[in-house]
Amino acid sequence: MGGMTDPSDTTAEQPPVRAEVHDDGVLVVTLDRPRAKNAVDGATARALAAALDRLDAEDDLRVGVLTGAGGTFCAGMDLKAFLTGDVPFVEGRGLGGLTQAPPTKPLVAAVEGWALAGGFELALACDLVVAGETARFGVPEVTRGLVAVAGGALHLPRRLPYAVAMELLLTGDPIDAARAAALGLVNRVVPEGGALDAALELAHRIAANGPLAVAATKRVAQAAQDWSLEEAWDRQDEITAEVFTSHDAAEGAAAFAEKRPPLWQGR
């Protein structure tokens, strides 16, 4: 749920979140409270939610990358702020405005250093994760008498073998990037300091694809685990039918036949 560190300096930095547009419609969202190890307070949560709203709202944006400044991804909830009643949750959207309501467009986490407690849960809410080789992931809430309620306790047993998930959740012990990759929680492990570049490479590859197809694919993949086998095909058709009759589908076929890059219009 929250950060298990007690940042030595939680002096407000402006802005707590930076959003920068890169080439090909990639929005890089940076948690920018390095002195607080990017721990999330209320202002940071609201700023992150606003950046994710921008990602979904602007047609020219195709993919988001979430990272942290200063060599740390995120230490979770800002405990000093929490003790004053300042909580890092956005109503209906969870921690950082992300964990309960991820954006409809793909989001790639670029993790360096610690992704701890709520920071790990932010990474779990992303679609892909790239980690520097010295990155560490953990949900140590139980060591502070808390529960990983921002997605850790819900998602880890679904994404890992039950015994492995329970070891992480009940001991609070962290794992390194190599172990996280072996467990399927991380897509790529790269040399320290290279996570953002590697995440951008993935993001640009995704952004080069048809935006309607990408969005529909994410919707199906996220929802399918809750569908019965009997309903799955019909539910999938409801989401994807308009993709196959879209301008972009015709453009994709024409570009292939003409051996040229497609010019997507998102319609």
Image (spheres, grey):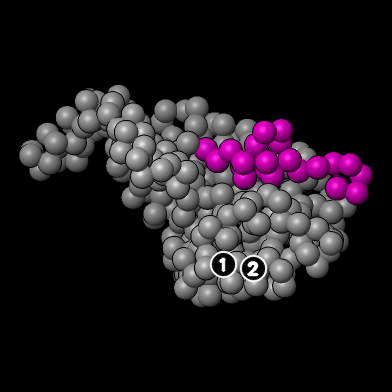
From the top left corner, tell me how far across and down residue 256 is, in percent: 12, 41
As drawn, the residue found furthest toward the front would be 230
Which region of the structure is painted magenta?
81-103
Residue located at (7% from left, 39% from top): 257
In the image, residue 75 above or below residue 225 = below
Identify which residue is drawn at 49% across, 70% down: 183
Side of 64 where 9 appears, left or right: right
SS for callout 2: helix
Q: Is residue 265 above or below residue 211?
A: above
Q: Is residue 93 magenta?
A: yes
Relative to 46, is 235 on the left or the right? left
The answer to whether any part of residue 96 appears in the image is yes
Q: Amino acid at mark 2?
A: Met
Which residue is depicted at the point 54% across and 31% down? 54
Residue 116 pos. (x, y %): 69, 62
User: Circles 1 and 2: CB distance less than 8 Å?
Assistant: yes
In the rendering, at what x and y percent does residue 21 appear?
49, 39
Q: Position of residue 240 (x, y in %)?
A: 30, 33
Q: Which corner quadrant of the image does residue 221 belong to? A: top left
- Mark 1 and mark 2: Cα distance apart in space: 6 Å
Query: Which quadrant of the rendered structure holds the C terminus?
Result: top left
Mark 2 crowdedness (10 Å alpha carbons): few <14, some 14-19, many ≥20: some
Q: Is residue 237 left or right of residue 155?
A: left
Q: Nearer the viewer, residue 175 or 134?
A: 175
> Which residue bears the numbered disc 1?
162
* Other residues around mark 1 within 10 Å, as few (<14) / some (14–19) / many (≥20): few
Question: Does the magenta-highlighted stretch encompass residue 60?
Answer: no
Residue type at the position of mark 1:
Tyr
In the rendering, which numbered label is found on residue 166?
Answer: 2
